[in-house]
Image: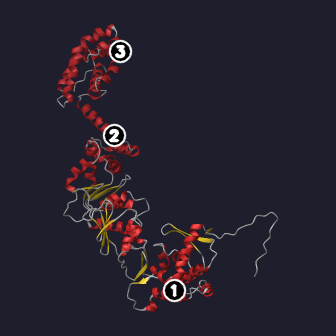
Amino acid sequence: MAGPGKVEFPGQKTQRMRARGTKRASAGVLKRLEKNLSDLLDDPHALMPIVAYTVKRARKDPVQRSLKECAKVIAKKNDRKWLSKRMVKKRGDGPARALAGSLHAAHDNERSMVAVFDHPIFGNSSFVRRGLAKPTQLVSFQNHGHPRQRLLVWEDHARSGWWFFSMEDGIICTGSEPAPPEGWLEGGLADAPMKFTQKGDVHCSPAASSDQNEGIHFRVGDSLVIIDESDLAGVAEGESVPRSVALRMMPPRLVDFAKIEWNWRPEGWPEDKDLPTAAQEKVDEVFEAWLNLAVTDSQLARTLRKALCLNMNEGCIIGERWWAMDDREAMIEAINGSPPEKAALELMLSGALEEGGLHIRGDGSFEELEDNVLKLEDTSCHANLIALWPQWGDLVLDEIYGITGENADAIVEKQTKRKQGFGAFLKKMEAERAEHVMLSRFPWNKGDMDGLCGHADELVRRARIEGVGSTITKAKKGKTPAQEALGWAWINVHERAESEGWHFGSDARDKGGDWVPALKALYEASGVLAEGGSSDEYVEAMRAFAARSGASDFVEV
């Protein structure tokens, strides 16, 4: 049934119809297509895969059936009418249908509009769309000089288990077994993101040598490819050696026949000791992903080392270094952090490892393990302390700082929420612990004496804990004449009268001057307490000060 007539209005511009996915071919594209189609028409037999396997049952062999159908098309390669019918036939062999369409296009002089093939792996090409064949199959025949795209026509057979290898001069089919032909690997390495040098059957990356044991040893048949890890770092994201090689075969499954060896071990791992099975299995999984084009070259070395180290089931491992479990002291020493941080981490690890192993992740979380193994992803004390603090912080407060109960719970909760730098936090805790220990040595608590003796005791305490400088301001702010006199005596004991004396009146000077010897003896007696000695001398000195100053608040202990 005819379509509706086209209505044109006066002055309307001429409209051009353009099918989706097509474009007007440039001169360069036309020239290339004309050459490809001309070569196809001249010798289509040359584009058929060479059968390099024993054919057992030809009628059940899909490749043989396709070759037979293609042979029928080749026999009619100059019959345009026959080709035009074959290329639109819905039933029958796919490659034969695509060959018919491509041969028909070879006879056509009008190729100004071409279809576009754009694939992230197989690249870009233009082709003439003819018949009902799959676009990928038309691309394959019409760009038969492309070592990757020429394989696309045989994709369906490859999915069914047949292997095709692209060589410089054509395609070789090895049947249902992957048997890379001689010279095939070299073609793939020529497309690799790094330059390889060949010596016999050994191919080396730029930094590798044919006799080195380090690096990645990648074996295909009798050929060996040695890749130095330093060469992997410079490869662009998305590129890889397996990709360059695998895309010259269909299906692109190197993992089915390639063998890989990797001799890297964590620093400290015994040379004569095999890797744990779990670690080796994870390494094999990474290599399988690399061969399956899921891991790029730039990611490979880092991914391999992380997989190996995080799947060890014995000893202690930090980053890429390993220690035996009984050598944890050396491991702690290798971690970045201050002595208090290392002491706290060692204590928490001791508590955490009592019933099994531990894996502290880089994101601040941890996992308890059944195996007797310690894994730290971060090499700093702070990151590991953050992960362990909520559960084992009370152990540190108890064992190191003597803080227990509700006080410890409050400190643990506060530090968990703030995530203050543990260096500063533990330094503060150490200062508070020292203050607590120092205060516990004095015979009187704050408030036991509320007069002149209590005021003098408070000055001595603060001077021993915070330093004399912190007490000078308090000494200058006496609220009573007795406290002013005590302040004058205090600055004289510490030889500050010349600089601070103008704050005091004559009465304070007269009275306080008589107290200087007794107050000095009291401060010197506190030095014995600070060193952990007996409090008897301090009590006697306080009694003497009370007698000299007339203080009435002295309390016997």
Q: How far apart are the two marked residues, 2 and 1, measured between alpha carbons?
A: 80 Å
- Residue 96 horizontal/vertical position (percent): 53, 84
- Residue 47 horizontal/vertical position (percent): 48, 80
Identify the amino acid type marked 1. Cys
- Residue 141 horizontal/vertical position (percent): 52, 78
**Residue at mark 3:** 480
Instruction: Identify the mark at residue 425; answer none if there is no mark.
Output: 2
Looking at the rendered image, the disc whose residue lies closer to the viewer, 2 or 1, is 1
Asked if the residue at tag 1 contacts the one at tag 2, i.e. Cβ–Cβ closer than 8 Å, the answer is: no
Depth check, front residue: 66 or 75: 75
Q: How far apart are the two marked residues, 2 and 3, measured between alpha carbons?
A: 39 Å
Question: Of callouts 2 and 3, which one flags the residue occurring earlier in the amino acid sequence?
Answer: 2
Tell me which residue sits at (45%, 79%) in the image. Answer: 158
**Residue at mark 1:** 70
Crowding near the residue tagged with mark 1, few <14, some 14–19, many ≥20 C-alpha atoms within 10 Å? many
Question: Of callouts 3 and 1, which one flags the residue occurring earlier in the amino acid sequence?
Answer: 1
Query: Which secondary structure, mark 1?
Result: helix
Looking at the rendered image, the disc whose residue lies closer to the viewer, 2 or 3, is 2
Q: Quadrant of the C terminus?
A: top left
Tell me which residue sits at (58%, 81%) in the image. Answer: 101
Identify the amino acid type marked 2. Phe
